[in-house]
Image: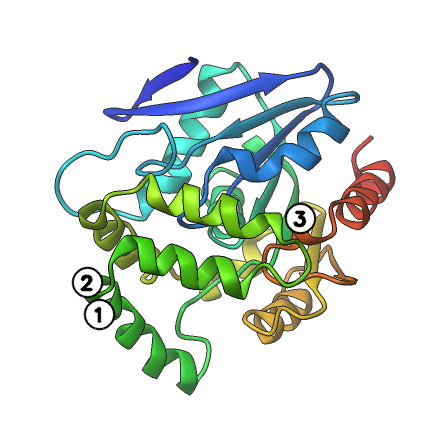
Amino acid sequence: MPVYNGSGVDLYYEVQGEGKPLVFTHGASWNHKQWRPQIDCFSQTHRTVVWDIRGHGSSALPDGQVNSEDFSRDLADLLDHLNIDKAILCGLSLGGHISLQTAVRYPDKVEALVLIGTPFTNAFNWFERMFVPLNRWSSYLMPISLSGKIQGKMLSKYNKDNQAYIEEAFGSITHRDWVRIWDAVTRMESRQDLHKIQCPTLLLQGESDTMIRRQQEYMLERISNARLEIIRNAHHATNLDNPDEVNEAIASFLAGNVI
């Protein structure tokens, strides 16, 4: 099992294929298995990397308060460990935010961004400023198994297999660790940094994903080299709901901007 010890934490990762590096980062409470449809496709043409964010899947989580700055530092350290000078970063939700922050903090390491259902703040409008603290508190009270079932049901409209995957991924995290992780995730903020992103950026949004729609439109206006595409028949688990259309959008973007 490939594990890299960076910044005092064991991080699990997998590498397949050869070519330009394409690094996938999963969403909160999920793991590297989220990207199977994309690895099957892009490992034929790229050096693909998937990994588990600290506290998720097979990666460890040190004791103490979780610092969200560690997420992008972990990704940058992993690139160094794999001798990757510059990579295309693809992430969904939290994974997209980590990829975005990596492009801001380590711009020389990022050739292009693919941000799927990605937030850049948890305080975009009055609703989020009111709801997110309540959601943070509910994570203390709700059993992890119930959280997985609720999320799985909500995100399985287009792909019934999502339910089992989400429950399994969520269930691999202890309640204590999830509370610490979610506290850090919901405090991530990049609104003031969007103008710093200069690399080609593809924004993908599931047509039914109302969770981040306004943020996607806001990013489109403020990232100088960005374009937005809507993925049909998809919610927030966009790459699992409609993998073929997601893969086609990514391939077209790479062909026009990177390859």
SS category of the residue bearing label 2: helix
Give whichever of 90, 243 is nearer the camera: 243
Q: Are marks 2 and 3 in contact (CB under 8 Å)?
A: no
The quadrant holding residue 85 is: top right
Dot 3, crowdedness within 10 Å: few (<14), some or many (≥20)? many
Q: Amino acid at mark 2?
A: Tyr
Relative horizontal placement of residue 179, taking residue 227 as reference (left or right): left
Between 213 and 207, which is closer to the camera in this rendering? Answer: 207
Q: Which mark is residue 239?
A: 3
Q: Residue at x 34, y 55 (%)?
A: 185
Counting residues from the start of the chain, the first of labels 2 and 3 encountered is 2
Q: Amino acid at mark 1?
A: Trp
Toward the bottom, the furthest residue is 126
Q: Are marks 3 and 1 in contact (CB under 8 Å)?
A: no
Label 2 and label 3: CA atoms lie apart by: 29 Å
Label disc, if present, on residue 140 of the rendered structure: 2
Residue appearing at x 54%, y 34% in the figure = 33
Vertical position of residue 97 compared to residue 41: above or below: below
Q: Badge 2: few (under 14), some or many (20 or more) residues near its Cα, within 10 Å?
A: some
Residue 104 visible in rendering = no
- In the picture, measured across the screen, residue 193 lies left or right of residue 248, that is left
| Marks 3/1: CA–CA distance | 29 Å
Question: Residue 78 location in percent, x, y?
Answer: 44, 24
Query: At which x and y percent is residue 204?
Result: 70, 57
Q: Name the image quarter holding the N terminus.
A: top left
Mark sitting earlier along the chain (3/1): 1
Decide: marks 2, 1 in contact (CB < 8 A)?
Answer: yes
**Residue 137: numbered disc:** 1
Q: Position of residue 17 (x, y in %)?
A: 69, 16
- Identify residue type, mark 3: Asn
Q: Residue at x 33, y 83 (%)?
A: 130
